[in-house]
Image: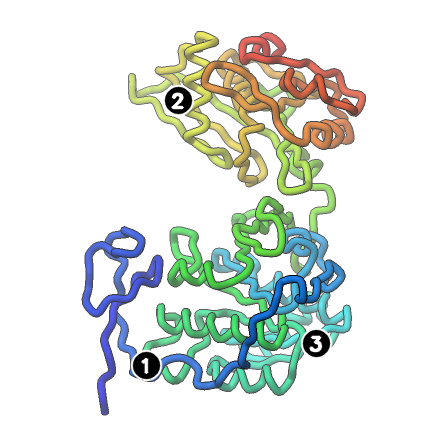
C-alpha cells in the first residue's frame, strides 16, 4: 500500500510546504509547521452545481425577515438579528465554558419556531445528549446524528434537508479520503470546506463548535476563521456565573455586539439588564472606583473601572497590570497624568481592572481610567453618582465621543445624577437625560471636577 504524501502545514495560517521550515513564509510565525500524512485523493468527489454569472440587480434581496431567530435575545443580538440561511457560524471557547449548552438551547428555540434542526454529535452518544437535553428543558424533537464520517453526514443532510445544522465539534469529524487523523490541519480545512459548500448550495444555516488552544484561539489554522461567515467566542471563568458571547467576525452584522449570560443548574440564563448586573457589587466610597459608559455595538453598558496605585517594593521596578482594558492605553494615560497633571507615579505599582469580566476597547473610557488612577493615588473616593466619558489625548486634551446621548440615558436610568463629558459633545447635545453635565476640554479640568 502506498504510504501517501508527507506534507507540512502551518497551524496558524494553513501554509503548506513539502519540507519542515522553522519560520512559516505565510504568517511569519516560528515553530508552527506540523507534519501530516496525506493521500493523493483529497476533498469531496461530489460535483457542485454549475454556477452562472448574473447581474447584481437581478439577485433577490435577502430581507431581514429571512433571518432565523434562535429564541435567545442575546445570541440573536450578537449574530446581528438571528441566523442567516446559508451562513456558516463558528463558536469557540474554553472547555466547559458552556458552548454545547448554548447551541443546545439555541436548538430548542429553533425547534420551537418550527425549524427542522439536525444536531451532529461527534463527542456524545444519543443517550448522553438526551440526558443533557432533559436537564436543560429541551422538550421539542431535535434530530440527532451521532456520526463523525463527513461522507455519511453529508448524505444524511441531503436526505433530511434540515433548516439548521449544529456540529459538535468540528475537530471530531473527518473525511475518509484523507489519511490524517481527525482534528488535523488538513481534516479541519476539508471538513469546514464541505460544511461551507453544503450551507451555500442547500441554503442551510450551519453552526459549528470549535475547540480552542491554550492561547485562547480556535484550534487549527487561522484559515478556518477566514472561511466561515461568523466567528463567536464564548468567554468567562468557569468558577464564576457570568458568560460573555462576543463576535470577532460577522459578515451579516456588527462585530461590536456582546451577549451576557449567567450559568445556572438549568442552563444559560440571559442577563436582561447588564448595566445593573455589572454594577451590583460596586463597593461604596472606595477610592479608585469610577463608572463609565461604554458602547458595545448598539447597547450602552455601565462598567466600573477599578484602579489600585500602591508604592512599589522593588524600587524603580514598578509593575503595570491591566485586566479588561488595554495595558498600552493605561501606560499612555499614566504618561499624560505625569506630564500634564504632575502626578509623580514612577515609583508606584499600578493595577487597573474593568469589573465584571468585560473587555473595554474603545477610547471613550480613557477619562474614567484617568479619574480612577487619580482617585486611588490621592486615596479620595469619587462621588458615587458621577459618570465619566471621554477620550484622552497626548496633549492632555479631552476629545469627543460618539453616542453620548445613549450613554447619558443609560446612566440616568440607573440613578446617576452627574456626568463629566467632553466639551466638544455638549454644544451639539440635544438631550442630556436630566443629568448635570460637567463639560471639560482638558484633563486638568476633569481632575478639578473630580
Residue at left 73%, top 73%? 115
Q: Position of residue 294 (x, y in %)?
A: 62, 33
Sequence-wise, the earlier of marks 2 and 3 is 3
Question: 376 left or right of 310?
Answer: right
Residue that badge 2 annotates: 349
Quarter that holds the N terminus: bottom left
Relative to 367, residue 341 above or below = above
How far apart are the alpha carbons under marks 2 and 3? 57 Å
Question: 371 left or right of 220?
Answer: right
How far apart are the alpha carbons under marks 3 and 1? 33 Å
Question: 216 left or right of 383?
Answer: left
Residue that badge 1 annotates: 179
Sequence-wise, the earlier of marks 3 and 1 is 3
Residue at left 70%, top 66%? 60
Residue at left 53%, top 15%? 397
Q: Position of residue 172 (x, y in %)?
A: 45, 73
Q: Position of residue 307 (x, y in %)?
A: 51, 24
Quarter that holds the C terminus: top right
Q: Position of residue 52 (x, y in %)?
A: 56, 75
How far apart are the alpha carbons under marks 2 and 1? 54 Å
Foreground mark, 2 or 1, reads 1
Task: From the viewer's side, name the closer residue of 305 and 223.
Answer: 223
Res. 116 mark: 3
Which quadrant of the view contains residue 417?
Answer: top right
Relative to 260, residue 403 above or below = above
Which quadrant of the view contains residue 34?
Answer: bottom left
Q: Secondary structure at mark 1?
A: loop
Sequence-wise, the earlier of marks 2 and 1 is 1
Q: Callout 2: 10 Å neighbours few (<14), some, many (20+)?
A: some
Res. 232 mark: none
Amino acid at each position: 500500500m502506498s504510504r501517501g504524501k508527507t506534507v507540512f502545514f502551518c497551524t496558524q495560517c494553513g501554509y503548506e510546504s513539502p519540507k519542515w521550515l522553522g519560520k512559516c513564509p505565510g504568517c511569519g510565525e516560528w515553530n508552527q509547521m506540523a507534519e501530516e500524512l496525506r493521500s493523493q485523493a483529497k476533498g469531496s468527489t461530489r460535483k457542485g452545481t454549475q454556477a452562472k454569472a448574473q447581474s447584481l440587480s437581478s439577485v433577490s434581496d435577502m430581507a431581514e425577515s429571512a433571518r432565523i431567530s434562535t429564541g435567545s435575545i442575546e445570541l440573536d443580538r450578537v449574530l446581528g438579528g438571528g441566523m442567516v440561511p446559508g451562513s456558516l457560524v463558528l463558536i469557540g471557547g474554553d472547555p466547559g465554558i458552556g458552548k454545547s449548552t448554548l447551541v443546545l438551547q439555541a436548538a430548542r428555540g429553533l425547534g420551537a419556531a418550527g425549524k427542522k434542526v439536525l444536531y451532529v454529535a461527534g463527542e456524545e452518544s444519543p443517550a448522553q445528549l438526551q440526558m443533557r437535553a432533559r436537564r436543560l428543558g429541551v422538550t421539542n424533537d431535535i434530530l440527532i446524528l451521532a456520526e463523525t464520517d463527513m461522507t455519511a453526514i453529508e448524505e444524511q443532510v441531503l436526505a433530511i434537508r434540515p433548516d439548521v445544522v449544529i456540529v459538535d465539534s468540528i475537530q471530531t469529524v473527518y473525511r475518509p479520503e484523507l489519511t490524517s487523523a481527525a482534528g488535523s490541519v488538513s481534516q479541519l480545512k476539508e471538513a469546514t470546506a464541505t460544511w461551507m459548500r453544503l450551507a451555500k448550495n442547500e441554503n442551510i444555516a450551519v453552526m459549528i463548535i470549535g475547540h480552542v488552544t491554550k492561547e485562547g484561539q480556535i484550534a487549527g489554522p487561522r484559515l478556518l476563521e477566514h472561511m466561515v461567515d461568523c466567528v463567536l467566542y464564548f468567554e468567562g471563568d468557569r468558577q464564576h456565573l457570568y458568560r460573555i458571547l462576543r463576535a470577532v467576525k460577522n459578515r451579516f452584522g456588527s462585530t461590536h455586539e456582546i451577549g451576557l449570560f449567567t450559568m445556572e443548574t438549568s442552563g444559560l440564563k440571559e442577563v436582561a439588564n447588564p448595566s445593573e448586573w455589572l454594577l451590583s457589587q460596586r463597593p461604596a466610597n472606595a477610592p479608585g472606583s469610577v463608572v463609565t459608559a461604554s458602547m458595545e455595538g448598539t447597547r450602552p453598558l455601565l462598567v466600573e473601572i477599578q484602579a489600585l496605585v500602591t508604592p512599589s517594593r522593588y524600587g524603580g521596578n514598578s509593575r503595570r497590570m491591566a485586566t479588561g482594558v488595554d495595558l498600552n492605553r493605561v501606560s499612555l494615560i499614566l504618561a499624560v497624568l505625569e506630564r500634564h497633571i504632575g502626578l509623580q507615579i514612577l515609583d508606584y505599582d499600578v493595577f487597573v481592572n474593568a469589573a465584571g469580566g468585560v473587555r473595554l476597547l474603545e477610547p471613550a473610557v480613557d477619562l474614567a481610567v484617568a479619574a480612577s488612577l487619580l482617585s486611588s493615588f490621592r486615596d479620595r473616593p469619587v462621588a458615587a453618582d458621577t459618570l465619566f466619558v471621554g477620550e484622552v489625548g497626548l496633549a492632555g486634551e479631552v476629545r469627543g465621543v460618539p453616542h453620548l446621548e445613549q450613554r447619558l440615558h443609560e446612566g440616568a436610568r440607573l440613578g446617576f445624577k452627574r456626568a463629566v463629558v467632553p466639551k466638544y459633545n455638549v454644544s451639539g447635545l440635544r438631550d442630556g437625560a436630566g443629568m448635570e453635565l460637567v463639560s471639560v476640554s482638558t484633563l486638568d479640568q476633569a481632575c478639578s471636577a473630580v
